[in-house]
Amino acid sequence: MSTQRGQLVVVTGPSGAGKDSVINTAKELGLEFGQVVTTSTRPKRLDEQAGDPYYFVTVEQFKASLAADELIEWAEVYGNYYGCTKAEIERKLADHAVVIVKVDPQGARAYKALYPDTTTIFIMPPSYEYLEKRLVNRETDSKEVIKQRLATAQKELENLLDWDYLVVNEEGKLKEAAEEVIQIINKNKDKV
């Protein structure tokens, strides 16, 4: 499947590292890209809507897409299903010079396997303690889910050599992290 026209960039990292914030700030700083929208069975939060940040579907709908081989990758994460449809990624790659996918590390590995020229960027928290504080302070998850996310993060932080680039999202330095992501993307434009 090397028919891609756009540059595929996968942004990954532990839950709570600030992946969305870094991507959104890069956009505010002028980075133009198509952003792949993941399909999820996770319940919608109050400030969310269909297509932002996910296409929300039922478990039955997700399993039907899976059975029809319509997904590039998928995972069950903290009791919810997440995945990206082949149609979504192909449409974005055809329409944009740069396409950004934000997924967990398991999903990032699937993209890299399918699209070997993918640039992978791992967003790291400045410390494990900072990550824990951030997950607690955002008040979106139960204590049990936070505990699961932290255990997963610990494992993810042990496999840093899997990624092309590491960007530390230091507290109070979001703009710098976003600028680093922009530099990485610009440096790799010729890779496609």
Image (cartoon, grey):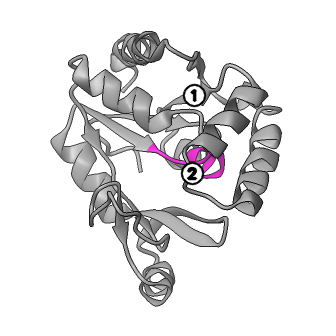
Camera-nearest label, 1 or 2 = 2
Q: Label 1 sits on what residue type?
A: Ile
Instruction: Find residue 170 and report its horizontal and vertical position in percent.
Output: 58, 15
Q: Label 2 sits on what residue type?
A: Glu
Badge number at residue 106? none
For the view shown, which residue lies furthest in the left direction? 95
Residue 168 in the figure: left or right of residue 65: right
Residue at the spot of label 2: 139
Viewer-side residue, 166 vs 54: 54
Query: Does residue 108 show up magenta in the picture?
Result: yes
Viewer-side residue, 110 vs 12: 12
Is residue 5 in sight in this rendering?
no
Residue 135 in the figure: left or right of residue 50: right
Q: Which residue is at a point 81% across and 39% down the rendered structure image?
A: 154
Magenta segment boundaries in residue numbering? 102-110
C-alpha gap between disc 1 and disc 2: 21 Å
| Position above or below: 101 against 164 | below
Residue 182 falls in which quadrant of the image? top left
- Are the residues at dot 1 and dot 2 in contact (C-beta closer than 8 Å)? no
Is residue 39 in sight in this rendering?
yes
Residue at the spot of label 1: 123
The residue carrying pointer 1 sits among few (fewer than 14), some (14 to 19) or many (20 or more) residues within 10 Å by Cα, namely: many
Q: Which residue is at a point 36% across and 63% down the rendered structure image?
A: 46
Q: Which residue is at a point 24% across and 33% down the rendered structure image?
A: 33
First-in-chain label (1 vs 2): 1
Residue 91 in the figure: left or right of residue 136: left
Residue 138 in the figure: left or right of residue 95: right
Viewer-side residue, 86 vs 121: 121
Residue 109 falls in which quadrant of the image? top right
